Image: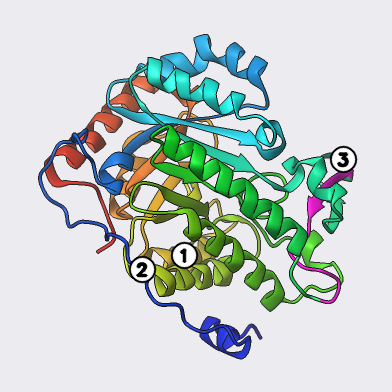
Amino acid sequence: MIRSFLVLFASAGIAAVPSVAHGRCPAESSGELHAAEPTSTEAIAGTWVLQQVTDQAELDRLLPKTIGPALKTPHIRGFSLRVPWKAIDQDFGLLEAGWKIARDHGVSYSVRFMAGRHTPAGVFDRECRFYLGGRGGREKIPMPFMEDGSPNTVFEKEYDAFVARLAAWCRAHDVRLLHLAWYGQDWAELNHGKEVRSQAGYRYENWLRAHVRLIDVGLRYAGEDLAVELPFSGYGPLTEAAVALADHVVQRIGPSNPIFFCQANGWGPKGDWGAPTAQVEAAFDRVWRKPICRGQQAIQPGDYDWPNLFEKLVANRATYCEIYAPSFTRQHKAELAREIQKFADHIRARGPLVPK
């Protein structure tokens, strides 16, 4: 049986860390969405257009037909660009190009990198432990632990150094939200799938500690001027882990602290987490009962019942949402635009949604 989170960390000799002295999510109050000096939640709140690209050529190709039209939708908060770590490891030119697109459209900008099969070859050249998976089962995936269960210090060192550079770039470009990656496999989400659980050195405790350490890396570079985010959904089983990770965040920085956001990346007709059953979805929903700031990402590009999705968004008190750019070209794009406006109007009138 998986031991409770507190017992796990007490037995590991990890002491409780004092709450980080940063601002808290403000109570809902009147105020403009685009204040002159917005708080973290005010700078993040609203609807973001999301697009993944692998290189400059793909970004250029998608800009006129997909990204551009989506960003012209009224009341869009910003442009969120998702890229492979290996595409920006040596050069932030692709991030600069996305930032320019956001600036040209008068919206905010946010970035996410993906590790897993998108981890740079140089990380593995430094003897980072890996297994083969991903597409065709031939791509290197970093392992969260070594064969004896100890930390994968090579990956963690490289990850820390990269996040430090990325956070500095974000601050220099007035980016207020930085989306981070887990060890992952195919995407940036949590990976607790059968592949990683079959590896030598696996124990739930070893896997969980590895991910807690990545949260702590993110918190080192977060502040009132830059929030970081990590998704609590992914390839499971994950319901116990998602709750444990939420507990760790609250323990570290206190309740409803907007320097960290968790995210549910399965926001769609069947719920928030992309879970295979209603029971698993309900188990994930325990995260929403924690005092942790949160956002939601559409499960995939689609043409949804947008009033239903935004109703769930508000009920979950999510500060922001991300919607894939192709969704803005579908049949119900006018309905989507209306819901985006309603969400923005709510924020203007009552302030950003935050956990109660």
**Residue 140 painted magenta:** yes
Could you tell me which quadrant the N terminus lies in? Answer: bottom right
Disc 2 on helix, strand or loop? helix
- Check disc 3 and report its element: helix, strand or loop: helix
Which one is in front, 17 or 288? Answer: 17
> Label 3: few (<14), some or many (≥20) within 10 Å?
few
Residue 278 against residue 185 in the figure, above or below: below
Amino acid at the residue labelled 1: Ala
* For marks 1 and 2 on the same chain, the one whose residue lies earlier in the sequence: 1
Instruction: Tell which circle, 2 or 3, labels the residue nearer the N-terminal end.
Output: 3
Quickly name the residue at label 2: 289
Q: Which residue is mark 3?
A: 136
The answer for how far apart the CA atoms under marks 2 and 3 are is 39 Å
Q: Amino acid at mark 2?
A: Arg
Determine the image quadrant of residue 182.
bottom right
Q: Decide: few, some or many residues near mark 1? Use Cα within 10 Å; few <14, some 14-19, many ≥20.
A: some
Type of amino acid at the residue the image marks with label 3:
Gly
**Residues at marks 3 and 1 touching, judged by CB atoms closer than 8 Å:** no
The residues colored magenta run 138-148
Residue 99 horizontal side relative to residue 193, left or right? left
Question: Where in the figure is residue 132, as x and y percent of width and height?
Answer: 87, 51
> How many residues crowd mark 2 within 10 Å: few (<14), some (14–19), many (20+)?
few
State the residue position of label 1.
Answer: 282
Report the mark closest to the observer, 1 or 2. Answer: 2
Mark found first going from the N terminus, 3 or 1: 3
- Image position of 22 with respect to 202: above or below: above
Percent coordinates x, y for residue 53 in the rendering: 62, 26
Task: Say if residue 330 shows up in the picture.
Answer: no
